[in-house]
Amino acid sequence: MDTKHQIIECPHCGHKMHIDLDYSNGDQDYFEDCTNCCNPIHLNLHINDLQHKLELNISSDDEQIY
Ligand SMILES: [Zn+2]
């Protein structure tokens, strides 16, 4: 299993925390609860095959529904 240790910053409170990204399954879209404020953090993991890079987008879960 391929994992990558990453530090992310909570979009709600700015708390930094460590997560382990599992990039063996390709692109992922999931939620992680902040250990500090307990709000859900939306993580979007995209694997760039061409450049062998991980792209991680972090956003809060307060996006509007149209
Ligand atoms: Zn937080």
Image (cartoon, rainbow, N blue to C red):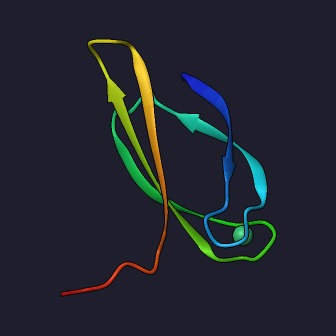
Q: Is residue 45 above or below residue 65?
A: above
Which quarter holds ligand 1? bottom right
The x and y percentages for residue 14 are 73, 62
The percent coordinates of residue 22 (x first, y second) are 53, 34
Quadrant of the rendering where the N terminus is positioned: top right
| Residue at x 42%, y 20% (from the top left corner) | 53
Q: Where, by quadrant of the figure, is residue 19 drawn?
A: top right
Q: Give the answer, above or below, for where 52 lies relative to 55.
A: above
Point out residue 28 in the picture as x, y percentages from the top left corner: 38, 45
Q: Residue furthest right?
A: 36
In the image shown, does 62 or 20 lie closer to the viewer?
A: 62
The residue under the point 72% across, 71% down is: 13
Q: Is residue 51 above or below residue 60?
A: above
Side (left or right) of 32 relative to 55: right
Q: Measured from the top left, where is residue 36 in percent x and y?
A: 81, 70
* Quadrant of image for the C terminus: bottom left
Residue at 45% in and 81% down: 62
